[in-house]
């Protein structure tokens, strides 16, 4: 069954010229790019996106980082794309990420780990509606 997910190439990935590498891995896996935009995220959107972390001590730093510079937001679809993309990204901490994953190969630290992907169909629907409202009903 085909599903959709939100993929972000975070500001560190954009600044380091890794957008093509990240998106290329998705395309080589056979997933389809449905929508994509380069943008600097505003604070309100960032706070809504990371709302589940609002009460955690790292929330302010997370919002500050994700709004600090341009990022690439994309909607990607394909069979089991959510689980596949989570595996392809690797663990949040690059030192603990499996070899060959994006974070093991490209990330330098936990707080700047190159990419984001929705963790469930419900999160994907919420995040796609937040970043690409015109796609939310499709």
Image: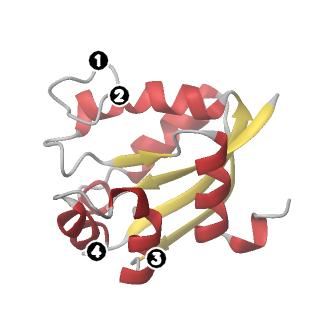
Q: Are marks 1 and 3 in contact (CB under 8 Å)?
A: no
Q: Which residue is mark 2?
A: 90
Q: How is the image coloured?
A: secondary structure
Above/below status of 138 relative to 118: below
Q: Is residue 102 left or right of residue 75?
A: left
Above/below status of 62 relative to 32: below
Q: Is residue 5 left or right of residue 63?
A: right
How far apart are labels 2 and 1 at the CA level? 6 Å
Q: Which residue is mark 4?
A: 69
Mark 1 or mark 2, which is nearer the start of the sequence?
A: 2
Mark 4 or mark 2, which is nearer the start of the sequence?
A: 4
How far apart are labels 3 and 4 at the CA level? 14 Å
Is residue 44 among the parts visible in the rendering? yes
How far apart are labels 1 and 4 at the CA level? 28 Å
Q: Are marks 2 and 1 in contact (CB under 8 Å)?
A: yes
Q: Which residue is mark 3?
A: 45
How far apart are labels 2 and 4 at the CA level? 23 Å
Mark 3 or mark 2, which is nearer the start of the sequence?
A: 3
Corner quadrant of residue 78: top right
């Amino acid at each position: 069954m085909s599903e959709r997910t939100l993929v972000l190439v975070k500001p560190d990935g954009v600044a380091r010229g890794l957008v093509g590498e990240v998106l290329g891995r998705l395309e080589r896996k056979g997933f389809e790019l449905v929508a994509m935009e380069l943008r600097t995220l505003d604070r309100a959107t960032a706070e809504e996106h990371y709302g589940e972390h609002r009460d955690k001590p790292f929330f302010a730093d997370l919002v500050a980082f994700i709004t600090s510079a341009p990022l690439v937001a994309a909607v990607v679809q394909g069979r089991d794309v959510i689980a596949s993309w989570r595996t392809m990204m690797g663990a949040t901490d690059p030192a603990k990420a499996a070899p060959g994953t994006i974070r093991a190969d490209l990330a330098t630290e936990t707080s700047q780990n190159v990419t984001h992907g929705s963790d469930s169909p419900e999160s994907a629907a919420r995040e796609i509606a937040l970043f690409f409202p015109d796609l939310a009903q499709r």
